[in-house]
Amino acid sequence: MDSNGQDFGLELGRAIADGHSLAALLELVVDYKDRGIAQEAVAFALQQLRKSAPDEAYEDRVLDVMDFVWGWCHVSRRIWDADLTEERLAAFVARQRGPDAS
């Protein structure tokens, strides 16, 4: 992942750890979208945050945000137009790893 991707993932992780509201976290995600950060990149960052969650409350908040990133919410609350699929996320991860990754 590039430095911008790492930066937004770290920023989102800090905001979750600091106890920001779901509304504030979703505003961050909308800002990432507006800056051109792909839905797959945000989903991947959230997966990494979930893997390193220090406690259940943190993991629950990550999962809450993931619902909106994946499009598992009411259509009026969607951030991206399309639901994210496992296939699209897997293709993104493969591109990030590069052609030499096994």
Image (spheres, rainbow, N blue to C red):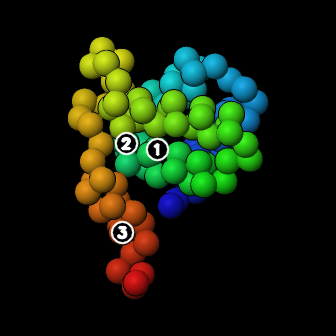
Residue 41 location, x and y as percent? 43, 49
The disc, 1 or 3, on the residue closer to the chain's N-terminal end is 1
Residue 21 location, x and y as percent? 63, 19
Tag 1 near tag 3, CB within 8 Å? no
- In this view of the protein, can residue 17 be seen by the observer? yes
Residue 44 location, x and y as percent? 46, 52
Residue marked by disc 1? 42
Residue 43 versus residue 34 in the image, above or below? below
Residue 13 versus residue 98 in the image, above or below? above
Quarter holding residue 101: bottom left
Q: Mark 1 and mark 3: span between their CA atoms?
A: 15 Å
Residue marked by disc 2? 39
Q: Mark 2 and mark 3: span between their CA atoms?
A: 15 Å
Q: Is residue 29 left or right of residue 6?
A: left
Residue marked by disc 3? 94
Of residues 57 and 88, the one nearer the viewer is 57
Tag 1 near tag 2, CB within 8 Å? yes
Q: Residue at image x 42%, y 32%?
A: 67
Instruction: Tell me the kind of residue under disc 3.
Output: Ala
Instruction: Tell me the kind of residue under disc 2.
Output: Gln
Q: Residue at image x 66%, y 54%?
A: 52
Q: Residues within 10 Å of mark 2 (few under 14, many from 20)?
A: many
Residue 71 location, x and y as percent? 33, 32
Q: Mark 1 and mark 2: span between their CA atoms?
A: 5 Å
Q: Is residue 61 left or right of residue 39?
A: right
Q: Is residue 69 left or right of residue 45?
A: left
Q: Residues within 10 Å of mark 3 (few under 14, many from 20)?
A: few
Instruction: Tell me the kind of residue under disc 1.
Output: Val
